[in-house]
Each structure stands twice: as C-alpha cells, then as structure tokens.
Image (cartoon, rainbow, N blue to C red):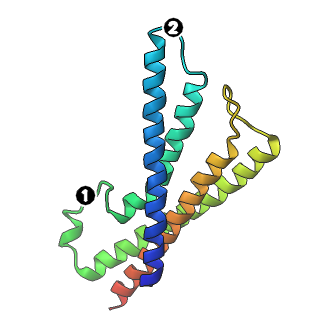
Amino acid sequence: MNKLEYYLTRISDSYNVVAAAAVVLMMLVIIVDVVLRIVRVSVPGAYDLISLLGAVAIAFSLTYTSIQKGHIAVDFLYQKLPERWQAGFDVFNESVGAGFFAVLAWQCFAYAASLRAAGEVSLTVKLPVYPFVAGIGASCALLSLYLLLNLAKAIRRMVK
C-alpha cells in the first residue's frame, strides 16, 4: 500500500505542476491582453484560452490538494468522537467521494470521446476541446484512486 501511495503522490505532484503552469499561462495571457488593449488590440481567443486553462488548473490540482489536506474541513465535533466512529465517518466519506469521482471520470472520458468524434473546437482559436475534458477525467480518476486508498486505510482503522 505504501508503494501505491508513493506513486499516486508522484503522479499528483506532476499534475500539480501542470496546474501551476496553467495558472502562469493564464496570467501571461491576461497581462498581454491588458497591455495590448492600450493600443486597442486584444489577444484573439483570450476568453477561450482562459476558460480552458482555468479548467486545467482546477482539475489538475484536485488530488494534490487532497493529499496535502488543503481543503476546508470543520472537524471540532469530529475530533471529539471515538476513533471507531471517526473511522466510520471516514469510510462513508471516502467511499462516496471515490464513487463520485470515478463516475465523473467515466463521464468525462465518454464526453471527450463524443467531442472528438464531433470535431468540437473552441470558438475563437479553434483548439480541440476533447483533450482538456479527457485531462479532467484523468485527474478525477487519479483522485478516485487516492480516495480508494484512503478508504482502505479507514476500513483498517475501523477494524482495529
């Protein structure tokens, strides 16, 4: 199980680098667009690029944020529960989360396939949209695997 956690963490780190690069690219597009508007020119497709890069930034940082426990949690009541109850709540949360993100990944891959078959592209810059949707699916699949790993740990804690 430690080996799986190691690989998931490494993949998550590389996904997070992609998310950070997307944020940097978003900033660059915005800066160039604002500066060029001074001379009454704008970056063609800035809206398309920002939308697609925003989706990449959010999706590719999901698993890293979960591993780092960077999400908002209200646990003052949770901490007062016995260890067995905490593990029970964790089993419920991790199983629901893993199932949700597995279904989301599956649907993203199916949607990406339909976008590819239809030849769907962004409006202005004519970028194919399906790789971005497939990337979101890959990120959701990675998060689902991580949540399944946490589910196994929670079941082990509950059984002890």
Give residue 40's mark: 2
Above or below, comparing residue 127 to residue 12 in the picture:
above
If the image is split into quadrants, where does the C terminus sit? bottom left
Indicate which disc, 2 or 1, sits on the residue closer to the N terminus.
Answer: 2
How far across and how far down the image is residue 60, in percent? 49, 53
Asked if disc 2 and disc 1 are in contact, CB closer than 8 Å, the reply is: no
How far across and how far down the image is residue 44, in percent? 60, 21
Quadrant assignment, res 73 = bottom left
Q: Is residue 79 left or right of residue 5?
A: left
Residue at disc 1, secondary structure: loop
Above or below, comparing residue 119 to residue 33 in the picture:
below
Residue at disc 2, secondary structure: loop
In the rendered image, which residue does mark 1 sit on?
Answer: 74
Nearer to us in this view, 119 or 153 = 119
Q: How many neighbours does mark 2 have within 10 angstroms: few (below 14), some (14-19), or many (20 or more)?
A: few
If the image is split into quadrants, where does the N terminus sit? bottom left
Tell me which amino acid carries mark 1. Val
Q: How many neighbours does mark 1 have within 10 angstroms: few (below 14), some (14-19), or many (20 or more)?
A: few
Give residue 63's mark: none
Nearer to us in this view, 103 or 109 = 109
